[in-house]
Amino acid sequence: MEEQRFYSLLEKLREFDGVEEAFLLNKDGAVIYKSHDFSLPPDEAIGILSAWKNKEPALMYQGFRFAILKNDEIQLAAKNIVGGKGNIVGSITKEGDYFLAHTRDEGMILLEWSIQINKVAWS
């Protein structure tokens, strides 16, 4: 995905209150773009994509465990249940990259976030 398209998707996603960070991973889990400067070590990014692709029960983000509640080839939805650290939602893009966002627990529920990121990624 080109950088301009990523930032266009990011603007569409930010129309919904509660987005903390967003990032794009390639098929190998390498970070292509981030919404701003935040810590996302390569091993953590690869771990997120691995958990998604391998249908694992949870993923780790920023040192916190997020239980995966929805996981298919196109979408991912995970929630930090114990610590109140929000959600991780993701969608594969038309280009085959993985567009993900960390969202707060306000405004929309997890599955609504999952639907919105999918709509944005395919727009």
Image: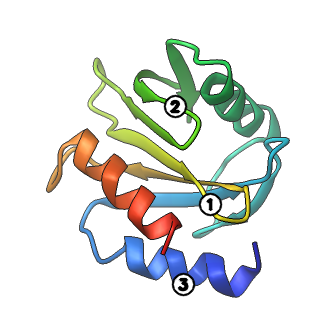
Report the quarter where the N terminus lies: bottom right
Say what secondary structure mark 2 lies in.
loop
Q: Is residue 93 left or right of residue 104?
A: right
Counting from the top left corner in percent of width and height, residue 82 is at 28, 17
The amino acid sitting under disc 2 is Asp
Residue type at tag 1 = Thr
Residue 95: image quadrant is bottom right
Q: Nearer the viewer, residue 86 or 52?
A: 52
Q: Which residue is tagged 1?
A: 93
Which of the 4 image quarters holds residue 88? top left
Disc 3 and disc 2 in contact, CB within 8 angstroms: no
* Residue 106 percent location from the top left of the image: 16, 51
Q: Which mark is residue 72?
A: 2
Element at label 1: loop
Please tell me which of labels 2 and 1 falls first in the chain.
2
Mark 3 = which residue?
8
**Amino acid identity at mark 3:** Ser
Residue shown at the point (14%, 56%) measured from the top left: 107
Q: Position of residue 49 (x, y in %)?
A: 69, 34
Q: CA separation, marks 3 and 2?
A: 25 Å
Left or right relative to 36: residue 16: left
| 81 to 77, vertically: above or below | above
Q: Earlier in the sequence, mark 3 or mark 2?
A: 3
Horizontally, residue 119 falls left or right of residue 110, namely right
- Looking at the rendered structure, the secondary structure element under dot 3 is helix
